[in-house]
Amino acid sequence: MSDDSSVRIASHLRSVAAERGPGAKLPSTRELAARFGAGPVTVQRALARLVAEGVVETRSGAGTYVRRAPRATVSGDLSWQTAALGPARSGPSAVGSTMRSVPHDTIALHGGYPDTTLLPMREIASAFTRLTRGGGRPEAFARPPTAGLPDLRRWFVDDLDADDWRDSDALITSGGQAALVATFGALARPGEAIVMESPTYWGAIAAARQAGLVIVPVPRTGGAPSAADLDAAFASSGARLAYVQPNFANPTGDVWTAAQREAVLDVVRAHRTFLVEDDWAHDFAMDITPRPLVCDDTDGHVIYIRSLTKSLSPTVRVAGVLARGPARARIGTALTVSDLYVSPVLQAVALDVVARPAWRSHLHRLARALQGRRDALVSALAVGAPMIEVPAVPRGGLNLWAALPANTADGTPTDPGLVAARALALGVAISPGPEWFPTEPTGPFIRLNFAAAGPERYDEAVAILAAAVDPV
């Protein structure tokens, strides 16, 4: 549809807003598209115009509403805080785009979680019911051990299926991010170095900077850091800590080979350093099911983190950390100081779900669903946006790491941030590549979450992405 259609829709909505008054809900994008015979992109342009004018506001998951007049506020002089706070370790930009709310009806390819249709919501609801019915599990309503409920710690150890691990080696945390923050703070001091693959998870980058650590990036060579690069990074920086994702790395989807795993562990042992293994996608294996790197470690070099939040529910923030020796003691102390303990109710619900046979059935269904969505988005990109390339189709995880053309149609370098902004204005949210690099990005990339939006919207999303890369 033309810009004239967008103007007509915007004019209609102004009239509706004036008639209904502040706080009133406006028609949905689908209703407006049907009424005016317009496409979703045209409707989104009209809504974006009214949002910019301050006429309407969008509420994630709820719809579009006539904006209420802002309340009058009395503001004091806050400028004194600038000097009092001093330099910031991290600013608002440290929080990745995956955590940002987007307008209602936006096709969300930017998030870090699967949509709820892929999650065991019925099982979670039943677990909460069982917990509260007839008193449930008494331990769920008392202060738990600071390390976590013993049965849940045992489950993390047993599910790892590796020798020589004990229940006492496990700690329960409030999600994987809390585990990273505590582990980095416990094993390295401010000003010290931490080695990281590049690109890597934005949350790990943010946690390291918040802890005052200096990030030493190493590139992935064939999907993993080479032994030579890792050895040089440890030797030059004096780092005693590294953060890695050997299986289905976020954002790239890379999986280390057996030879790469052995080579990395050899370097870590030689330098007597710690390796934090983030097994974030343990429950999202599709074509292969690689074992965690920690299964090959017997001397306490690998600190293992596995979160259940993404595969259970964003509301059940539970993760496990496995570590040995004094390192485990220091991480445990850091977690106790920061959180005291994780909600025993959430721990009990998580254990109830994962300890039942239905959990394995759910993971099998999830793998098939993720395969279908991954393949559908790869195909949609190949047909509708061939200028956006997927260098390697991931064999697990939730994301596609896609390369944009080096230059736009007019010859200027492609800016992933600008592409993301254009796409959002047209109704698609994506994650720009630069926030996944600890230092300068090596090219124009974007990350697309194929688990966060249904395949029925992929063609529409891809058409918008193509327009955002090369606007006419």
Image: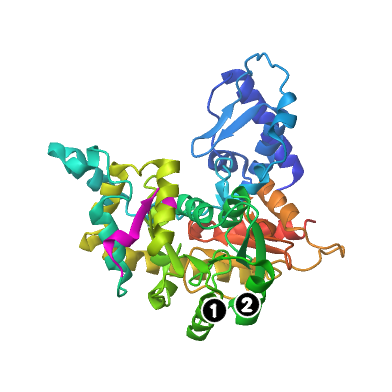
Residue 277 vertical placement versus 203 (above, below): below
At mark 2, the secondary structure is helix
Q: Toward which corner of the image does residue 414 lie, by quadrant? A: bottom right
Residue 306 visible in rendering: no
Residue at image mark 2: 231
Name which of mark 1 and mark 2 comes first in the sequence.
Answer: 2
Is residue 174 located in the magenta-colored stretch of the structure?
yes
Relative to the observer, which residue lies in front, 381 or 123? 123
Give the residue drawn at x 71%, y 23%: 78
Residue positioned most to the bottom:
259
At mark 1, the secondary structure is helix
Q: Position of residue 50 (x, y in %)?
A: 69, 32
Left or right: 436 as drawn, with respect to 165: right
Residue at image mark 1: 270
Residue 469 visible in rendering: yes
What residue range appears in magenta? 165-175
Give the residue drawn at x 58%, y 34%: 58
Is residue 116 located in the magenta-colored stretch of the structure?
no
Give the residue drawn at x 53%, y 28%: 25
Q: How many marks?
A: 2
Residue 231 vertical placement versus 114 (above, below): below
- The kind of residue tagged 2 is Asp
Left or right: 255 as drawn, with respect to 215: left
10 Å crowding of disc 2: few (<14), some (14-19), many (20+): some
| Colour pattern of the rendering | rainbow
Q: Position of residue 468 (x, y in %)?
A: 72, 56
Which mark lies nearer to you, 1 or 2? 1
